[in-house]
Image (tube, coloured by chain):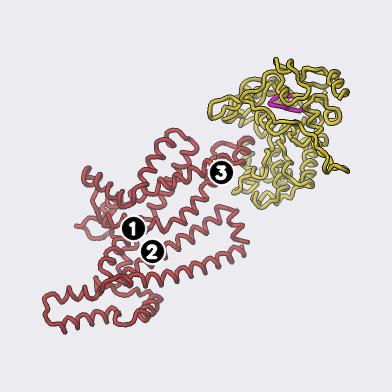
Chain colours: A yellow, B red
Amino acid sequence: MGKIMLEVKDLNTKYITREKEDVYAVNNVSLKVEEGKSLGVAGESGCGKSTLALSLMGYYFPPLHYMSGDVIIDGKNISGMSPDLVRKTVLGEEIAYIPQAAMNALNPTKKIIRFIEDVIRAHEPKATKKDIRDLATERFQKLGLPPDVLDRYSVELSGGMKQRTVIAVSTILSPKVLIADEPSSALDVTSQKMVIKMLRDMMETGFIKSMVFITHELPLLYNVTDDIMVMYAGQIVEQGSAKEMVFDPVHPYSKGLMGSIIVPEEGIRGKKLDAIPGTPPNLKHPPAGCRFAPRCKYATEECRAGYIPTRVFAESRMMRCRLTEDQLREVYANE
Amino acid sequence: MKGYKKYFRKRIVWYLITLVIAVILNFMLPRLMPGDPVAAITANSAAGLTDRTAAQQIYDEYAEAFGLDKPVYQQFFIWVGKLFTGDLGVSFINYPRTVSDMIGSAVWWTIGLQLPAILTGWIIGNLLGALAAYKGKFIDKGLMPASMFISGFPAFGLATILIFIFVVKLKVAPAGGGYSFDLLPSFSWRFISSVFVHYQLPFWSIVLTLIGGQAIGMRSMSIYELNADYVKYSRFLGVEDRKIVGYVFHNAMLPQVTGLALSMGTMIGGALVAEIVFSYPGLGYTLVRAITGQDYPVISGCTLIITVMVLIANLALEIIYGFIDPRVKAAQVE
């Protein structure tokens, strides 16, 4: 077992709305990512995937607030640290972030190199312009990006190039954990492939030591990550290896999610597409008991009664359901 | 860089076309006013004369001296022809003083007053708006509405209020003029301090009318920029707050520069009114006296100078804009 790069224990965070209502977006999430490994986080829109990404960085802005739990990066617990210390010593250096909307992630009126200077100097105030340029040029070359991008403005770059530049800038300080929040969802397939290749290369060369990859595109996760975690309504519903999760999901929600993937095949036109009925619940008032129960076709009164803890099964897998693995498999078999 | 020059060549051609149209209007409009300036001047000089032919002779002489005996289109071409030599004609009411001489002494008062005042108002307004967006609380709830309220006054109204407070009640400032009546322009300490004291009320009345409008625009632009993706991204890479504030301020300011260029004409118009209220010896004051006396050449001369100033200010801002916003520069080069 490798060194644990990112460990999260019972993390709880919430949004406080303008009306002073609490929205419990991340609920008792625990996870571990080892060195050289990557974890995929899947789920529908509004399941708390992006909020989890923001919560992992230990840097909270209203309306997001920390409640309880620990985020430990390479043995260092960042949850109790002051925001300013987190900014100086953690962000960018220990944990880096690739935003969902990389299209607008770069300041339109600053050259890329000027922004890299600001990023590096935030952590190493004494770094000279020349050192920074040398480092950036070398890094860009290694990642297969033309170094003349450094002297351009983001408006001059194509979408795919912008995304890859953002990835290169985010990882310029070789962080231990990279959090990629849907880094490829707005790209065409070719650019998507380049982004994925780049992320893999960075893992291999050690520019990043581990990765949390958030996406709603499940086939992509299978290609990119070692493990997959499925989230629903701010909670983990099932976790396992990528292969198990894609080909053998057990929890009704994961199963529904995998069943909703549209694969191009003969006769798909006109065929009724499988989808999970309904939408994720409003987390201002999460349903009591199993949060998925209102949409689950196997739900009973018992499911709605009380809190459902996660349970470990098949040695390394984990699931949050009242029924056991065997019971679920039996239910599916009788359908 | 080549495309950039080409762009500005094109722009300058447009500015020249604007100038030509402005020159025609500047010539025509004063002359369309009802009334006969020569008759008024003749009536003055011929006061007490009973001889009709003598009065008629004075009238003809003045009309000839002013060039008003010729048809209007001929007058226009003579005027334009003289423009190229820098001759703006002779004032009717201050005959034989030349228009260039009158404007030459007035224009520096106007530039000296308006350029610093407009820039100060613009900068204070933008800082206030950015602070209101970033800090909120007192600035947003107290200072912003107050500056909005003050800017709601027209320039002349605010000028009158300032005169009432500082001249009539507090008796700390002079009521008007560019310097004390008992002084002659010189490089003495007394004269300069007198100019400084007379400068304050017109200066602040212009500044105060500008702040509110600028602040409200900057406030909403800053709020918009603060929520931009690049701000979030920069924060999550640990970039220092003051750097991020710098990004936001720079990007939020860009539309404000456009706004400055667009409203330059209106601002100068408003500021001219302030000059009049304070009898400030600038273009506004000269222009009003020329209008009441139907002094065509002076009116045309003043409006021409104002037009040229606005056009130059716009061109300068457009050039600056290309440097501060790469997106605009990219569009300019295309």
The chain letter under disc 3 is B
Output the chain of dot 1. Answer: B
Question: Which amino acid does the dot numbered 3 rest on?
Answer: Tyr
Which residue bears the numbered disc 3?
B247
How crowded pointer 1 is (Cα within 10 Å; few <14, some 14-19, many 20+) is rated as many
Residue denoted by label 1: B272
Quick one: A310 or A334, which is closer to the camera?
A334
The disc labelled 2 sits on which kind of residue?
Ile
The residue marked by circle 2 belongs to what chain?
Answer: B
- B162 or A174: nearer the eye? B162
Structural distance between the alpha carbons of marks 1 and 3: 36 Å
Which residue lies at the image location 70% right of the left edge and 43% below the top edge?
Answer: A135
> Secondary structure beneath disc 1?
helix
Give me the C-alpha separation between circle 1 and circle 2: 10 Å
Viewer-proximal residue, A42 or B204? A42
The span picked out in magenta is A229-236
Left or right of B286: which side holds B22? Answer: right
| Residue A176 in view | no
Q: Quadrant of residue A22?
A: top right
Cβ atoms under marks 2 and 3 closer than 8 Å: no
Kindly check if marks 1 and 2 are in contact, taking CB atoms under 8 A apart as contact: yes
Q: Amino acid at mark 1?
A: Leu
Q: Whole-percent x and y of residue B53?
A: 16, 84
B12, above or below A219, in the image: below
